[in-house]
Amino acid sequence: MSFTSTLLQWFRMNGRELPWRETNDPYAIWLSEIILQQTRIEQGRPYWERFMRRWPTVEALAATTEDDVLKEWQGLGYYSRARNLHHAAKQIVERGGFPTTLEGIKQLKGVGDYTAAAIGSFAFGLPAAVVDGNVYRVLARHYGISTPINSSEGKKEFAALAQQLLPTSQASLFNQAMMDFGATQCTPTSPRCPSCPMQETCIALCEGRIDHLPVKLKKLKVKERHLLYIYIRYKELTALHRRPAGDIWQGLYEPWLAERVPEGAIPLQLNVKHVLTHQILFADFYLWEPDEQPTLPSDYFWTEEKQLDHYAVPRLVELLLQKLPTQKR
């Protein structure tokens, strides 16, 4: 039995039941793909359900504000996905509907080759193979491919192989099967090789190279940053700042990011470690309750403390705010 036939047979018995697989609605499918970028299904599913309840159509999503989308996205991280999602919703509405070709789908903000192939195959049956981390791993192990998956050569090689294996009349099933097989059977660590239906044809298993494939080139060095946050509490007001473009957390809000601790501020939590993809942050968090209202930098504004929940904040700031005493000292 061929790789493709074996995979599809496995999927019929072991495929995951997911709500966005029960529809051909390109909006629901696109939304799930954007949410599940860099996010596990267990974490992303409640967000998808909330988005679908609050904005059941792409028109509804396009009509809302970016702030509302960022607030609903809070806790998922990689906030550029939320901004791109909102921008792309407006693109779709402006063009009069969801694009039905791969090239058209790729024109949407935040949609690359993988996401376009997923949306195209799931919503419209387009014969395009998806290639993500799961697919790289399954193919690298089964075919014994040691070309680095994050090299230009590797990306071309794996994309061509996946496309070659794809049955054009069952593109959606094949792509879902590849995802599920990599996520639940051929997992990154402790893969379920003893129960794998492809164990006899898997080169990595036969050669004892399961733990060595796929091969990935070393990443860039992660840099460290130190942040000093001062939460100002003055007569039930506090100061916020919306982070600009060109850095982490664009469009999200944060307390005063200071260069030094003002006199009278008290520490609430120090040296809090927060890990991002290419950065490790260390944050100190202070509470300052001045007797007179301080003058804020030009890009900060005052808001009532009881309104804080209306602003989308990064996960790190959310954790820090939980350390605030509820009453004025």
Image: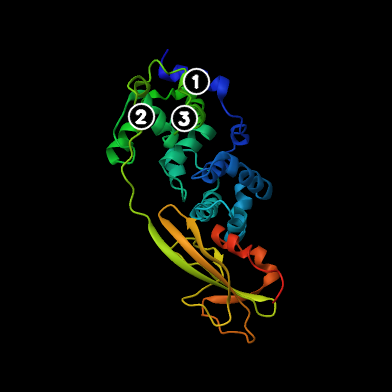
Answer few, some or many: residues within 10 Å of disc 2's Cα (few below 14, many 20 plus, some between 14 and 19): many
Mark 1 lies on a secondary structure that is: helix
Answer few, some or many: residues within 10 Å of disc 1's Cα (few below 14, many 20 plus, some between 14 and 19): many
- Quadrant of the drawing holding the N terminus: top left
- Quadrant of the drawing holding the C terminus: bottom right
Give 193 or 148, whichever is nearer the viewer: 193
Residue 132 seen = no
Q: Indicate whether 246 appears above or below 2.
A: below
Give 202 or 28, whichever is nearer the viewer: 202
Task: Compute the Cα span from label 2 to label 1.
Answer: 18 Å
Mark 2 lies on a secondary structure that is: helix
Mark 3 lies on a secondary structure that is: loop
The residue shown at (44%, 22%) is 167
Q: Which mark is residue 190?
A: 3
Q: Quadrant of residue 140?
A: top left
Q: Horizontally, is 167 left or right of 52 in the view?
A: left
**Three-letter code for the amino acid on which mark 2 is drawn:** Ala
The residue wearing badge 2 is 140
Q: Quadrant of residue 17?
A: top right
| Front tag of 3 and 1 | 3
Sooner in the amino-acid sequence: mark 3 or mark 1: 1
| Front tag of 2 and 3 | 3
Q: Which mark is residue 8?
A: 1
Sooner in the amino-acid sequence: mark 2 or mark 3: 2
Sooner in the amino-acid sequence: mark 2 or mark 1: 1
